[in-house]
């Protein structure tokens, strides 16, 4: 257990991911926020940009330094920047500073696959130092790591739904993941096809067979168990602001009852506070603004359906990042993350 405050910096504090990091870390009992960057808002009070934080912080945004070796004394840096920006910044970090990247820059080990899905090149050999930060399946590696590649939001929802079944070794055939996300997953800046007024009364699929979270799901499942299944991953625009709902369809080599599958998942997640096994179906309203992932399982003999619901900005981004930070500094992973959703 660390005694002094963890001196923390956030790079990219003006977007939705940065906003959630601020909301969580400002009230984390073991954290002192030292630096929050947002180049286009430099000099503005944080609460002038994030009105929900009015009266809760006196921090102001600053411009990120060109040379990170001149950073003030910090213990950890969170990078909540667009894809590609952390690639050049991360190698500049002082050797005693830990980092968690919330973008996709360090999630994919294979450089060719990374370029295919992100249209970017790996920089140097830093990729080998990153640990994939799906807390519930990679907890021990995260504890001893310096660099964390925080999972994507879709990947988090899908992997938590699939990991127990993959670990069981009972799967056969293809896996189908049908996932939907709210508009906040597209970021704070509106674009023609992601702006909420365009999405709020509509429903459509996007990036079929090409979503950038597909290779990280496949890559991490291979570390969970023997995984050779074909993965079909489809994403859709959900007409809500927050939340991801993933429907996952699996086939098994043996007949499993509903109770068999439920027990399999309960056993796998028995020490995972933030994964809840629910009856019937999860509901994104139950997990919005929280770090919980709710799962429900159903079986029809050799066919299994697993439903997964998370908040894309918390468990799918900032909350999971803080959960990982807690482990990296020897803290209980729940610290600073105990808050419930609303009802209704």
Image: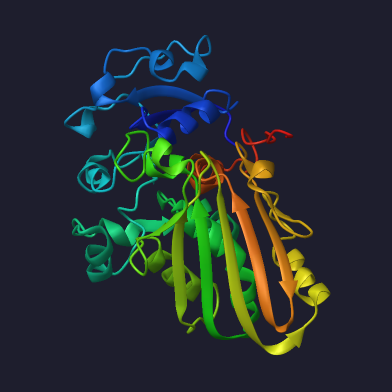
Residue 210 visible within the image: yes
* Residue depicted at x 35% and y 48%: 103
Please say which color scheme the image uses. rainbow
Residue 273: give x, y in percent of width and height: 70, 50
Decide: is 50 above or below 125.
above
Question: Residue visible at 19% across and 56% down?
Answer: 123
The quarter of the displayed image where residue 119 is located: bottom left
> Can you give x and y, in whole percent of width and height, for residue 42 in the image?
26, 18
Q: Is residue 101 above or below residue 139?
A: above
Which one is in front, 201 or 287?
201
Comparing 13 with 282, the one in front is: 282
Quadrant in the picture for residue 85: top left
Instruction: Tell me the quarter of the image containing the C terminus.
Output: top right
Q: Would residue 63 be visible to someone looking at this image?
A: no
Please state if 255 lies on the left or on the right of 161 as rendered.
right
Compare residues 163 and 313 and report the one nearer the observer: 313
Q: Residue 102: horizontal and vertical position, in percent? A: 39, 45
In percent of width and height, residue 46 lies at 40, 17
Q: Residue at x 66, y 71 (%)?
A: 305
Numbered circles on residues, count: 0
């Amino acid at each position: 257990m660390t005694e002094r405050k963890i001196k923390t910096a956030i790079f990219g504090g003006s977007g939705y991911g940065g906003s959630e990091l601020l909301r969580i870390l400002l009230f984390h009992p073991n954290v002192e926020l030292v630096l929050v960057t947002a180049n286009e808002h430099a000099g503005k009070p944080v609460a002038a940009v994030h009105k929900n934080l009015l009266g809760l912080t006196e921090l102001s945004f600053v411009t990120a330094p060109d040379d990170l070796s001149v950073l003030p004394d910090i213990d950890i840096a969170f990078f909540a920047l667009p894809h590609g920006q952390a690639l050049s910044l991360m190698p500049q970090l002082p050797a005693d500073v830990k980092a968690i990247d919330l973008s996709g820059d360090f999630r994919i080990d294979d450089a060719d696959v990374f370029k295919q899905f992100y249209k970017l090149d790996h920089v140097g050999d830093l990729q080998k130092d990153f640990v994939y930060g799906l807390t519930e399946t990679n907890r021990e590696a995260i504890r001893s790591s310096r660099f964390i590649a925080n999972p994507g939001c879709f990947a988090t929802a899908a992997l938590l739904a699939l990991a127990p079944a993959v670990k069981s070794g009972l799967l056969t055939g293809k896996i189908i993941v049908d996932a939907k996300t709210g508009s906040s997953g597209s970021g704070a800046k509106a674009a023609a096809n992601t702006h909420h007024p365009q999405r709020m009364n509509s429903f459509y699929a996007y990036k079929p067979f090409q979503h950038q979270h597909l290779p990280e799901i496949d890559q991490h499942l291979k570390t969970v168990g023997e995984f050779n299944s074909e993965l079909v991953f489809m994403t859709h625009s959900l007409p809500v602001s927050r939340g991801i709902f993933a429907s996952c369809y699996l086939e098994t080599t043996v007949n499993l009852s509903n109770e068999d599958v439920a027990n399999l998942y309960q056993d796998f997640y028995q020490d995972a506070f933030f994964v809840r096994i629910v009856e019937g179906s999860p509901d994104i309203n139950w997990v919005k603004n929280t770090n919980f992932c709710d799962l429900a399982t159903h079986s029809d003999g050799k066919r299994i359906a697993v439903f997964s619901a998370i908040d894309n900005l918390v468990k799918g981004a900032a909350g999971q990042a803080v959960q990982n930070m807690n482990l990296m500094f020897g803290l209980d992973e729940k610290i600073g993350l105990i808050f419930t959703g609303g009802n209704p």
